[in-house]
Image (tube, rainbow, N blue to C red):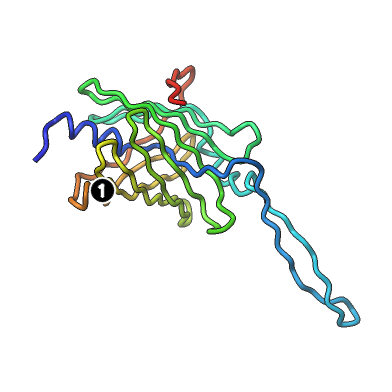
Amino acid sequence: MFDINRKVMLLIIQCNLMTVVFLGTAVTVSAQNITTDGNGLEKSVSTSVNATQHLQSLDWLVGQWELKSDDVHIQCVVDWSQNKNYLISRNRINSPQGRHIASIHIIVWNPVSELFESYIFCNDGSFGNAIWQRYDDVWQVSLKMILFNGESLTSTEFYTPVENGFTWQSVSRTLNGTPLPEIDTINAVKVQNLKIPEIF
């Protein structure tokens, strides 16, 4: 058993509305396609796809959002980086008990794994990473967090784009391998003029 403050902290850390992988400068993936000409001679054709082109499939995340339930109130501002090689989300999570956590999440295409990956950094020292995979219109995010006190937190999150926003849900949540309650689906509503504290 653990006290209510610890429960609140776990809920706040768990509500990761965005995610992160940091590859830095411009990333371009090149491939060689071997074809033959009319005389049967081989020739190569180079094609390139950069990180920005891959990230366009997550462009629906860009904006200012609020997600509210009886247990948590999440605010986030998602925007492109200056060179558009990754998406940055700055988040603030408020609990009914008055506890607040600020975090930064960065999403980038990984050309080695050919997946979207992400890292999360919180202002209390917690950090984590995640893998994003798309199944039809639903994005599944497999998340692993190391909390500031050394404990481990895992979950599977689902993001589903809908008209004028998206929904978010967190299931299969564990703390050090012990199951935690699921977080039911929450609707993200677009808002304006959010003020999110910087942590870097």
State the image coordinates of residue 103 (x, y, percent, origin top left): 40, 30
Quadrant of the rendering where the N terminus is positioned: top left
Find the residue positioned furthest to the right: 39
Q: Where is residue 165 in the image (x, y as percent from the top left)?
A: 46, 35
The quadrant holding residue 198 is: top left
- Going by the picture, which residue comes out furthest to the left? 1
Name which residue lies at 41% across and 48% down. Answer: 130
Q: Toward which corner of the image does residue 114 lie, by quadrant? A: bottom right
SS at mark 1?
Answer: strand
Total numbered circles: 1
Task: Point out residue 46 in the picture as x, y percentages from the top left corner.
Answer: 77, 61
Question: Around disc 1, counting alpha carbons within 10 Å, would you say few (fewer than 14), some (14 to 19), or many (20 or more)?
Answer: many
The residue that label 1 is drawn on is 173
Expressed as whole percent of the image width and height from the top left, the position of residue 17 reads 39, 37
**103 is higher (above) or lower (below) than 160:** above
Residue at 39%, 40% (x, y): give it.
167
Q: What residue type is labelled 1?
A: Arg
Residue at the image point whose x is 37% and y is 35% from the top? 187
Q: Is residue 9 above or below residue 137?
A: above
Name the side, left or right, on which 36 lies relative to 120: right
**Residue reaching furthest to the bottom:** 40
Of residue 34 and residue 187, the one placed in the foreground of this image is 34
Left or right, 70 with respect to 138, comes to left
